[in-house]
Image: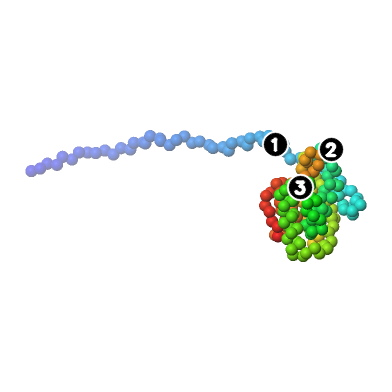
Amino acid sequence: MLRTASSSRTSSVQWLIESRPPSLTWARPSRQQSNQPPLDLIDHEFDHADDTAANHRGVRVSTVKARWAARPRPGLPDAQEWSTTLALAVIQALVGQRPVSQLNRWMVEEVLAAINICQRRSLSLRGRTAIPTALRSVHVQHPDPDVAEVSAHVVMGRRSAAMAFRLEALGDRWLCTALELGSAPSRLLVGSGLGHDRRLD
């Protein structure tokens, strides 16, 4: 006869050891103080253009007068008069009224070549037809003593267009290093100052 010994088992509850990490509070780092001064929008000097009366050619010429504008280096020709002469010469060359060779000393080879191509294309389409040209206004600013940035309003026949070019000092004279005429998609855009893209449509 088999005897089964029954052993008494007691149930007990044991607490687990706390294993959670301690709680942490994350805070956003404080913003570092910028070295850049705040933008002054109060009592500042407004940029303005020193407008002059129309010159003997009937062209209104102005130059930006602002704190950031530089004064042209002494010894350079007057940028207003020089820009007026150059803008008129460029539009006359584009329509074939002036030989491109007359602009040789006034601009870099890249700009000169683009004007030459544009003139040949214009002559092949229209021939040597007399096209009235005019210059309405010229606006000059000097970001650097040796640089003049010019915008002009020109008229070629029935077309009115905007022209922009950059002048850089070469010794005691100005040299056109970039030229943009008209607006996309039909425009002339050449030179180092405004990019190397070239469109002659």
Can you identify the residue that label 3 sits on? Answer: 107
Say what secondary structure mark 1 lies in: loop
Q: Is residue 158 visible?
A: no
On the image, the x and y values in percent for residue 177 come to 74, 46
Q: Are marks 2 and 1 in contact (CB under 8 Å)?
A: no
Q: Give the x, y percent position of residue 88.
A: 83, 53
Gap in angstroms between the C-alphas marked 2 and 3: 19 Å
Q: How many marks?
A: 3
Q: How packed is label 3: few (under 14 Cα within 10 Å), some, or many (20 or more)?
A: many
Q: Position of residue 131 (x, y in %)?
A: 82, 62
Choose the circle earlier in sequence order: 1 or 3. Answer: 1
Q: Is residue 156 above or below residue 67?
A: below
Mark 2: few/some/many CA within 10 Å (<14, 14-19, 20+): few
Seen from the viewer's position, the closer of residues 71 and 191 is 191
Element at badge 3? Answer: loop
Q: On the rendered image, what quadrant is the N terminus found in? A: top left
Q: Nearer the viewer, residue 65 or 96?
A: 96
Q: How is the image coloured?
A: rainbow
* Quadrant in which residue 7 is drawn: top left
- Which of discs 1 and 3 lies nearer the camera? The answer is 3
